[in-house]
Amino acid sequence: MKRVSRFIFASMSRKVRVRFAPSPTGGLHLGGVRTVLYNYLFAKKYKGDFIVRIEDTDQSRYVPGAEEYIFDTLKWCGMIPDESVQHGGDFGPYRQSERKERYKQFALQLVNDGYAYYAFDTPEELEKMRQDLKTEHNPTPQYDHHIRMKMRNSLTLSSDETHKLLSDGERFVIRIKVPENDQLSFTDMIRGEVKFDTSTVDDKVLLKADGMPTYHLAVVVDDHQMQISHSFRGEEWLPSAPVHILLWKYLFGLENMPQWAHLPLILGPNGKLSKRDGAKYGFPVFAMNWTDPKTGETTEGFKEKGFLPEAFLNYLALLGWNDGSEQEIFSMEDLIERFSMERVHSAGAKFDYEKAKWFNHEWIKKSSNSFLLPQVKTLLETNGITIVDDTLLEKIIGLIKDRCTLLPDFVPQSSFFFQTPATIDADAIRPKWNEDKKKFFVAYSEKILNSEWNAVTLENMFKELATEKNIKPGELQLPFRIMLVGGKFGPPVFQIAEVLGKDETVKRIDGALKIF
Ligand code: GLU
């Protein structure tokens, strides 16, 4: 209760501005999309701004094409940013590599104020330190208050030596000087109060030798300059929070520090959900297909697998959140109304592909035929079926959508409406086939030639004729279905006949009779 009231106060006292801050390093994992979603829902709920900031300061991890992919994914999901590289805004640039100079100013300010220092250690010296100080209890020694005075930095060198190294163009980084034994805490919107002891925190690099900031410096400067009110990010960033709090304190006196929420992980069958899990268990992990430009390897996406974005987002929303009721199907409008960060669980949420498919099936069933039409039409056309009559296709969609879990299911479920089945499952019929049944179908096809053409009439005539010939109608329906569809599937058979039309129905009966 306490957490909720504090948050309401904060959100009302300040315009809500949230940001999704991806690093363009590859495809967007479903955990990333859920982070976007929670940001988006929160922004819309509080009539705030949803900002997308591209965090591309790590040149070694930059992957061409990844930024466009992120925006394409947001578009597919219908989560359109209010401000971004592509959408403009008053707080740009929205790409960190274009804000380089600003970070440097702040890093120098920290050095001048005694909160950070120049470090000149070479990679070899750092490695030597790690080897020398490595013990059984501390296998990976960190650059921290224990060792900083043993290294080559502006704390151990005289100011003349430091200036000389700087003017000689020696490579340097700027590190934060984390205080020893300080207690820090903040209130996470999901986890409540989180405390840290600074003696376990290392002197993180803030400005790298290439002049680029690290994430730690850039995130604090940008969240401040972009007036971000709430920062939602993956829980892997929780250990970095003390560094960020210190930077907020040293640079801005903690004024307007955003409220943080560290989102739980999405778990796969064996712990953290990885790209490899997708390949191993045969389900997508990325929002859309992603092709690695270096290897040419494509990782499958939910979009191409045949998910509706509505279903994908509905399931993602529930991976870690619920509204306290049993309701599972939520539209974006419902989610915006009901979502609250305080109801996000702190424990990891397990991804279940069967459940994801269940959501898609539900969404396909509840979508209108006209909404599904363009997507189904494109799918059929890529499978060589030309659609000339949209009204007819809409009708077919209505007949078969209950049977489709993923969008590509519409192809086998509907192609027999447009093409005579290439094969007929005659084996399913032969064991119970006999001359009487054959005579029935010959008579039926003659009879329907002059009849009114709708499913009800066709069914009535079928039943009457069966009674007349003393055959159970149930025994005739499967053969009839196989004649029209080719196999044991599809919607009610008389509705299929109605859509196929008189000539085609009679033609398929005749054709099948020759085979049986
Ligand atoms: N660039 C960071 C990431 O991709 C962003 C973390 C944050 O939202 O602050 O994980």
Image: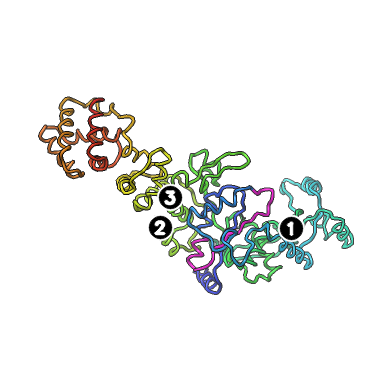
> Could you classify mark 1 by the number of other residues whose Cα lies within 10 Å: few (under 14), some (14-19), or many (20 or more)?
many
x 57%, y 51%: residue: 68
Q: Which residue is drawn at 11% across and 32% down?
A: 470
Q: Give the range drawn in magenta.
A: 39-62
Rounded to the nearest whole Å, what is the CA distance between mark 2 and mark 1? Answer: 44 Å
Displayed quadrant of residue 384: top left
- Residue behind mark 1: 207
Q: Earlier in the sequence, mark 2 or mark 1?
A: 1
Of residues 161 and 147, the one nearer the viewer is 161
**Is residue 44 located in the magenta-colored stretch of the structure?**
yes
Relative side of 448 to 417, left or right: left
Q: Is residue 305 visible?
A: yes
**Residue 414 picture location, percent across and down:** 34, 41
Q: Is mark 3 on a helix, strand or loop?
A: loop
- Tag 2: Cα neighbours inside 10 Å, few (<14), some, or many (≥20)? some
Name the kind of residue labelled 3 in the image. Leu
**Nearer to me, 492 or 497:** 497
User: What numbered label is drawn on residue 330?
Assistant: 2
Q: Do the residues labelled 2 and 3 touch (CB within 8 Å)?
A: no
- The three-letter code of the residue at mark 2 reads Phe
Amino acid type at circle 1 is Leu
Quarter of the figure with the C terminus: top left
Q: Ligand 1 within 8 A of label 2's CB?
A: no
Q: Is residue 485 above or below residue 181?
A: above
* Residue at x 50% of width, y 51% of height: 349
CA gap, disc 1 to disc 3? 43 Å
Q: Residue 308 carries which label?
A: 3
Q: Where is residue 451 in the image (x, y as percent from the top left)?
A: 16, 41
Which comes sooner in the sequence, label 1 or label 3? 1
Q: Nearer the viewer, mark 2 or mark 3?
A: 3
